Amino acid sequence: MYELLYIHLPFCRQRCAYCNFVTEAVPEDDPHMDAYLERLMRDIRAAAHAGELEHIRTMYLGGGTPTHFGHARLVELAYLLSLSIRLEQVEEYTVEANPDSLTPALAKDLYALGANRLSVGVQSFVDSELAVLGRLHTADQAAQTIRESRTRFENLSLDLICGIPGQTETSWQYSLEQALSLEPEHLSIYPLQVDHGTPLAQAINSGALSAVDEDSQAEMLEQAARVLGAQGYPRYEVASYARPGYESRHNTGYWTGVSYLGIGTGAASMRNTLEGTRERWLCGEEPELLSASEAAAEDLFLALRMSRGVSNTQLKEASTLLPQALNVFEELQSLGLVVQTNQRYLPTEKGWLLGNELYARVWALAEGS
């Protein structure tokens, strides 16, 4: 039974300099997008006919840049979704948007067809930093788009990136303050990741741009936690901050092991079985089967992405499949990666900054079970 639905729209006007996702840059009139829409609609109808959309409670249209898909195409897609899913039971329906392609008219139509949340890719409120990232909008454009979206949407999320070459503590503080001045309900804060083969990596390797300073980036992440927390946006996940009550229900579903269905190129799906095992697959590929022990370990390290962490009860239940779980969590506590309080193991700031080490130690439980 799927509760989350993700629709992938892998098209952009231009690929960002840091992008390593499954996307392609195409013009607005590219017929490839028409053909893609037809395939999406066929797959959505098939999923509805198979009963796979009956229990959907959150929806997310991501990319790419969904708002670059074109007004008419996106409205046609949203209309089909409104016919295929019981929108009255959908708690959260998010559409990703970029400031250069979200218009007031499109926002109005998406809202009319059931969308109730926008996630706007701002990344920075400093134009020189946007240029480094290869973004097509300006800071003023982003602010204007967000203000215009307020006429329809009361739930807005903004993305910001820290660790951009040339970014300083002062400019990062400015971006945080500008974001807060727009009063979003949710903020996602991401450290810049430089992936091999991207234009950004090539510019850094050639010496045209300075390399990302990981220490400075870590300080910026801590700075964001202080600033946003003080302004009423507590951190509820490693990269996510929200006003109370506006935590992303869709993303929280991923982190708490809820079954999800992905439709479209590059979309991922996951299904829990009655036997306690778990199937995962990318669209068009064969499923990967996780054993019950692997599923239990995955649930533990995903829970450590969240500020509420792992309860003693959850850890005790997981220990039936993972006998060394308690020992590993005590070791994580001794390393300062988690802290135990109120019958829960909570990730520390150090644990979040050293997330790869934290998650690897927990995942290793499945290998030893």
Image (tube, rainbow, N blue to C red):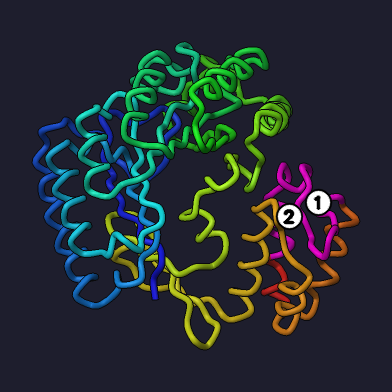
Q: Residue at x 57, y 40 (%)?
A: 242
CB contact under 8 Å: marks 1 and 2: yes
SS at badge 1: loop
In terms of image quadrants, where is residue 19?
A: top left
Q: Is residue 106 magenta?
A: no
**Left/right of residue 205 with respect to residue 266 in the rendered view:** right
**Image quadrant occupied by the N terminus:** bottom left
Q: Is residue 337 magenta?
A: yes
Residue 358 got which mark? 2
Give the spatial CA distance, label 1 vs label 2.
Answer: 7 Å
Specify start and end residues of the magenta stretch as a single range: 336-362
The amino acid sitting under disc 2 is Leu
**Left/right of residue 181 with respect to residue 346 in the rendered view:** left
Q: Residue at x 80, y 76 (%)?
A: 324
The amino acid sitting under disc 1 is Leu
Measuring from the top left, give residue 177's x and y in whole percent.
59, 19
Measuring from the top left, give residue 187's x and y in whole percent.
54, 35
Q: Residue at x 90, y 56 (%)?
A: 334
Nearer to us in this view, 46 or 278:
46
Closer to the N terminus: mark 1 or mark 2? 1
